[in-house]
Image (cartoon, helix red, strand yellow):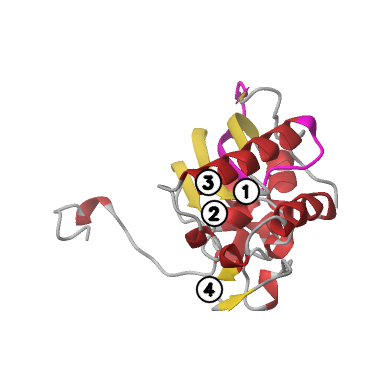
Amino acid sequence: MAAERGLSEHFSFMECDLNNWKAEHQFDSILAIHSLHHVVALEKLFDEVHRSLSDDGAFLINDMIGRNGHLRWPEALQVVQAFWKGLPHSKKYNHQLNRFEDEFVNWDCSTEGFEGIRAQDILPELIKRFEFECFLGFANVIDIFVDRSFGHNFDPKKESDIAFIDRVAMTDEALIESGKIKPTHLIAALKKQGAVLKTYKHLTPEFCVRPP
């Protein structure tokens, strides 16, 4: 794609294991998009990012920070199950596994591969090493009803489906803001030093950590 658009000279592609990545240069920006939750050696990777980032550089992240394996913690699972009980059978079809789930299954995705293998450790380890310039923690319960498994059961043009998703989203946001549940996603810009934090309301990185 880069070659087709005449941009090849601006990109250098490499295949590597991020658990053992060693930077050969210093960078002004490092971008991680939904990749960190597949990494086992987070500490090693973050140390290397910190070492290779320029003093004024930015580490930009969009990733998942919920419970390992993308499981729901008990306090969030209780809310999911309450919504689940009120759903008609037709809304409980799992499009990834091609089956109906009358009872919600709190599936550990890390049992097969590295999906969410250390998701819950991402935010605490970032806090130890970097300063946040901006941070947005969001979503939790809503994930279940809009993801690849069950999201296709809801029609964005159907008023009753819109109302249900809105109700889940408002409940989710209220519980996150109260601290009763913690966000499962983050978007953030981090620096090595000198950052002035900007957040949504009072949802700081520290507030959004869920102790294991």
Specify whether 106 is left or right of 116.
right
Q: How far apart are marks 1 and 4 (CA)?
A: 18 Å
- Between 169 and 115, the one lying in front of the other is 169
Specify whether 72 is left or right of 170.
right
Q: Which residue is drawn at 53% across and 46% down?
A: 160
Task: Look at the numbered discs 1 and 2 and tell me whether their residues touch, using CB distance below 8 Å.
Answer: yes
**Disc 3 residue type?**
Ser
Label 1: element kind? helix
Label 4: element kind? loop
Q: Which residue is identified by label 4?
A: 96
**Is tag 3's residue or tag 4's residue first in the polypeptide sequence?**
4
- Between 156 and 202, the one lying in front of the other is 156
Q: Residue 142 carries which label?
A: 1
**Is tag 3's residue or tag 1's residue first in the polypeptide sequence?**
1
Q: Which residue is drawn at 83% across and 49% down?
A: 75
**Disc 2 residue type?**
Val
Q: Residue 202 placed where, x, y %? A: 71, 24
Task: Look at the numbered discs 3 and 4 and tell me whether their residues touch, using CB distance below 8 Å.
Answer: no
Q: Which residue is identified by label 2?
A: 146
